[in-house]
Image: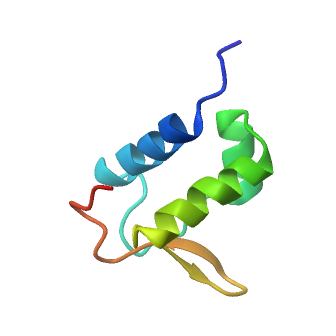
Amino acid sequence: MPIPPTMDELIKDLLRRIEVGEFQPGSQIPSTQELSDHYDVSVSTIHRAVAKLRGQGVLVGRPGRGVFVAESSRGRRP
């Protein structure tokens, strides 16, 4: 069983997935629970990572709809 990623590794992998087009600009990212299961980390860890990426403008939240990749996220780096 692999070791769960650190917060920095988690954020780096989410950014990589956006950069390679797995998560397209304007598309909704998987749910918190799906990401938690995928990375084998707590839901609170996912919330913190998503909040950091939202603060950087990479992700945007839509109340009642979910979290989406920002339309202008291509090429952004923290």
Kindly identify the residue that appears in the image at 48 percent across and 62 percent down.
Answer: 53
Where residue 51 sits, quadrant-wise, is bottom right
Residue 38, position as x, y percentages in the image: 67, 38
Up/down of 52 relative to 3, above or below: below
Kindly identify the residue that appears in the image at 37 percent across and 63 percent down.
Answer: 24
Q: Which quadrant does the C terminus fall into?
A: bottom left
Residue 75, position as x, y percentages in the image: 21, 60
Which of the two residues, 76 or 25, is positioned nearer the viewer here?
Answer: 76
Which of the two residues, 61 or 28, is positioned nearer the viewer here?
Answer: 61
Up/down of 27 relative to 8, above or below: below
As drawn, is 23 to the left or to the right of 19?
right
As drawn, is 18 to the left or to the right of 46?
left
Up/down of 12 relative to 56, above or below: above
As drawn, is 50 to the left or to the right of 32?
left
Kindly identify the residue that appears in the image at 43 percent across and 57 percent down.
Answer: 23
Furthest residue toward top: 1
Up/down of 33 relative to 39, above or below: below
Furthest residue toward left: 75
Residue 29 visible within the image: no
Residue 46 visible within the image: yes
Kindly identify the residue that appears in the image at 30 percent across and 51 percent down.
Answer: 19
Which of the two residues, 30 or 14, is positioned nearer the viewer here?
Answer: 14
As drawn, is 66 to the left or to the right of 72?
right
Residue 70, position as x, y percentages in the image: 39, 74
Residue 1, position as x, y percentages in the image: 71, 12
